[in-house]
Image (cartoon, rainbow, N blue to C red):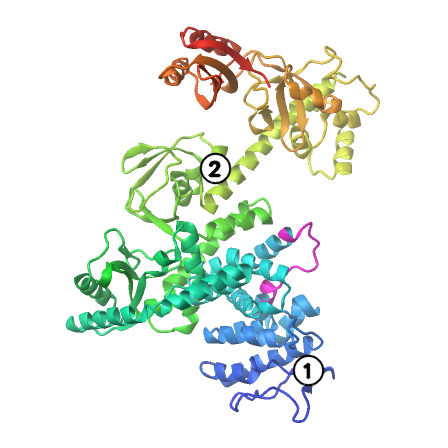
């Protein structure tokens, strides 16, 4: 496909025939003129600054193809659709991205919106460009149950493409940025949905990649679209307050420049203003009024050399007194996105706080462009560390994706991982680990290694033994204690904050639940078959193979897991395997015809104990089969049983094994006379009987008596009876009984 040389050397004009508004495409159809705001001539002039003539010719050829493919399409604003790809390419040209990226930007919607195949793109523009375009394209040929699932699956596809080639996300961010700039043409409900997605996903990704300029614009545009009234009020407040700040800003900047000159330091200084979304987020998160947030004067000082940054810091601390505890050295310990700078807060004139950022020119480039600095600034090491940190993050995403159960869970994990703040802690060997604010010892363990996280049992923080749920703070040294045979606790999901920890815990528990479900399903099916003197092993192989084929399951373990999780009923499965057997009466209403299923207490997550009646070993119990959860054990006297008697096929006869392992929660109600220290006394008594208190609530009755509701753990009925006897011995106890739902 040949193309004329683009008119990049001339003043930018629309690509059009002299006397009309269209040019003819290769198929004879009119090719639309691009929007005056984003002309191909302007783009080519941009590209001339850093690309060769032949490379620009290839870009122009992609423009002609895209314009022809989108010839019949318009944006909601009424502009020809081709204006959007040209604008996206122009955003990438500002970042000095390479020719394949610019070409892919011009073609990024042709697979999704015009029916052009990936193979056709590869044939005309090469495999590299085709992969980039495909990575940005949404999945249009698949059907999803919900908008959320479609969004999550498309996001997963894009991130996996990004793992292979980081340029995919740079094109997607440019695409999202232009869509946000032109969001006004959308109906209100779509504006809010796109703005929410931008604030939740795309702005944090830009931040994670160090692309500060892109992040700030995405945040402010998203804020304006999602909270238009708040945005307007805050913008007016900033505009009004800005007038009172000019004189103070001028005095501070003059003093800073004078201080630097006295030290013989050449530097570029500038005041900077917080962006609107940053002000709003700080007001909301810290519950501060606007006056306190905006009453901070911020300056940036940019120098030529690394060591000069620390000289400037000394000069600033000599000029104004520093605020204790507000100094951060991101040069020695860069942020997770590669950001480097010195931050300090000073007491300025009139008592106003002054935030000062000190960095080199190279650091400033990386701070603004992030990973895009790799393309835009070719001197020195600009973007190098950021590039490596981004690739490390992508490797973590790939690991998360492998462990995530589905696309929605993966999207949730990525959102958790897009954290704004970090804490820096040390391993016993002195290595530094970066973790999100609020991370616990369990998060630390998983950041070291998945195996360490899965087997951790305790933690030493600064050489002191501390609970695993302890939040970590900057500068702490953390040592993880592991034990062979230990495994993740489901309760960890309540406090871990890193996506890696959450994903690996869930992955382990799912595999563990499956193993437990298979074991329980085997016992349940064997129980049903035993009434006909059959076992699973004695079944004719053909019967089992036929049943697996009919149900679409791959093997016997899949069938047993379905039974254990109550997705399939054991009596019905047995009936399919023994088609000639006689139907038996329902097991719930006629007792004694079958041996009940024995409960050991070690079945794990596929056997649950009802919280309404808290059954314990020794109680007469029944089992209710709940889809996806397995068996829920109820006390036979539980009031909730009555409402489910109509679903007799789901009830299962169960009994306790003679030797049951573990501890089980049980609720007791203790009526006591109001005396000082009575709660502490009873709690100490319960503790002395080797029982833990899981929860306690109080109900005051008539001012003279109080009812205490304890949820405690016991081994069996004998253990509970011993605890009740001990409690009855206290003179404050008026009445005590067990609650059974």
Q: Along the horizontal axis of the image, is 78 left or right of 367?
A: right
What is the number of the mark on residue 494?
Answer: 2
Taking the spot 70% from the left edge, 56% from the top edge, the residue there is: 142
Residue 81 is marked as: none
| Mark 1 element type | strand
Magenta residue check for 145: yes
Q: Can residue 477 be seen in this view?
A: yes
Q: Which region shows up in magenta? A: 133-148
Residue name at image x 44 percent, y 10 percent:
733
Image quadrant containing the C terminus? top right
The image shows residue 617, relative to residue 465, as above or below, that is: above
Dot 2 crowding, Cα within 10 Å, few <14, some 14–19, many 20+: few
What's the CA distance linking mark 2 and mark 1? 57 Å
Image quarter of residue 195? bottom right
Q: Is residue 97 left or right of residue 605?
A: left
Mark 2 and mark 1 lie on one chain; the one further toward the N terminus is: 1
* Residue 48 x/y as whole percent: 48, 84
- Counting from the top left corner in percent of width and height, residue 21 is at 67, 87
Q: Do the residues labelled 2 and 1 touch (CB within 8 Å)?
A: no
Q: Who is closer to the viewer here, 47 or 531?
A: 47
Residue behind mark 1: 31
């Amino acid at each position: 496909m040949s193309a004329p040389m683009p008119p990049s050397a001339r003043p930018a004009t629309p690509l059009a025939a002299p006397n009309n508004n269209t040019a003819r495409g290769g198929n004879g159809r009119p090719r639309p003129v691009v929007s005056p705001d984003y002309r191909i001539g302007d783009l080519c002039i941009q590209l001339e600054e850093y690309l060769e003539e032949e490379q620009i010719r290839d870009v122009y050829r992609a423009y002609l193809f895209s314009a022809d493919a989108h010839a019949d399409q318009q944006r909601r604003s009424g502009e020809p659709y081709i204006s959007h790809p040209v604008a996206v390419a122009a955003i990438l040209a500002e970042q000095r991205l390479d020719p394949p990226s610019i070409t892919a930007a011009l073609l990024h919607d042709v697979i999704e919106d015009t029916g052009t195949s990936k193979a056709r793109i590869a044939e005309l523009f090469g495999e590299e460009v085709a992969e980039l375009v495909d990575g940005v394209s949404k999945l249009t040929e698949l059907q999803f149950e919900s908008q959320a699932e479609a969004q999550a699956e498309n996001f997963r596809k894009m991130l996996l493409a990004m793992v292979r080639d980081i340029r995919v996300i740079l094109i997607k961010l440019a695409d999202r940025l232009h869509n946000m700039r032109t969001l006004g043409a959308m109906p209100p409900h779509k504006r809010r949905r796109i703005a929410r997605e931008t604030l939740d996903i795309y702005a944090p990704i830009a931040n994670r990649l160090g692309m500060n300029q892109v992040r700030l614009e995405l945040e402010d545009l998203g804020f304006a679209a999602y909270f238009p009234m708040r945005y307007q009020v805050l913008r007016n407040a900033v505009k009004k307050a800005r007038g009172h700040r000019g004189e103070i800003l001028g005095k501070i900047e003059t003093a800073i420049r004078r201080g630097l000159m006295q030290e013989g330091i050449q530097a570029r200084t500038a005041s900077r203003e917080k962006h609107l979304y940053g002000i709003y987020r700080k007001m909301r998160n810290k519950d501060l009024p606007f006056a306190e947030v905006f009453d901070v004067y911020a300056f940036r000082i940019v120098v030529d050399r690394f060591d000069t940054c620390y000289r400037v810091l000394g000069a600033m601390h000599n000029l104004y007194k520093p605020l204790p505890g507000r100094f951060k050295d991101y040069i020695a310990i860069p942020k997770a996105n590669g950001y480097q700078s010195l931050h300090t807060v000073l007491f300025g004139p009139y008592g106003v706080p002054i935030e000062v950022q000190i960095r080199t020119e190279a650091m400033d480039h990386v701070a603004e462009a992030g990973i895009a600095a790799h393309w835009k600034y070719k001197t020195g090491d600009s973007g190098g560390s950021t590039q490596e940190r981004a690739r490390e993050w992508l490797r973590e995403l790939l690991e998360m994706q492998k462990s995530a159960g589905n696309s929605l869970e993966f999207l949730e994990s990525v959102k958790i991982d897009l954290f704004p703040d970090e804490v820096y802690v040390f391993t016993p060997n002195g290595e530094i680990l970066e973790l999100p604010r609020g991370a616990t010892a369990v998060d630390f363990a998983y950041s070291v290694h998945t195996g360490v996280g899965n087997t951790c049992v305790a933690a030493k923080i600064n050489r002191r033994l501390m609970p695993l749920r302890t939040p970590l703070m900057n500068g702490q040294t953390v040592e993880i204690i592991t034990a062979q045979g230990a495994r993740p606790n489901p309760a960890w999901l309540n406090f871990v904050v890193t996506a890696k920890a959450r994903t690996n815990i869930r992955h382990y528990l799912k595999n563990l639940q499956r193993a437990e479900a298979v074991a329980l399903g085997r016992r349940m099916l064997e129980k049903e078959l035993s009434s006909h003197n059959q076992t699973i092993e004695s079944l004719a192989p053909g019967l089992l193979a036929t049943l697996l084929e009919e149900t679409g399951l791959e093997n016997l373990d899949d069938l047993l897991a379905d039974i254990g999780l109550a997705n399939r009923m054991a009596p019905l499965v047995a009936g399919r395997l023994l088609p000639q057997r006689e139907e038996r009466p329902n097991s719930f209403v006629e007792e004694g015809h079958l041996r009940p299923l024995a409960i050991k207490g070690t079945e794990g997550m596929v056997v649950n104990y009802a919280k309404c009646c808290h059954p314990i070993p020794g109680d007469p119990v029944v089992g209710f089969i709940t889809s996806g959860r397995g068996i829920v054990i109820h006390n036979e006297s539980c009031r909730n049983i009555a409402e489910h008697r109509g679903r007799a096929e789901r009830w299962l006869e169960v009994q306790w094994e003679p030797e049951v392992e573990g501890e089980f929660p049980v609720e007791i109600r203790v009526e006591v006379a109001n005396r000082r220290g009575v709660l502490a006394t009873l709690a100490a008594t319960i503790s002395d009987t080797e029982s833990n208190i899981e929860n306690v609530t109080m109900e005051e009755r008539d001012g003279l008596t109080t009812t205490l509701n304890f949820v405690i753990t016991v081994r069996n009925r004998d253990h509970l009876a011993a605890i009740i006897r001990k409690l009855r011995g206290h003179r404050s106890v008026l009445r005590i009984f067990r609650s059974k739902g």
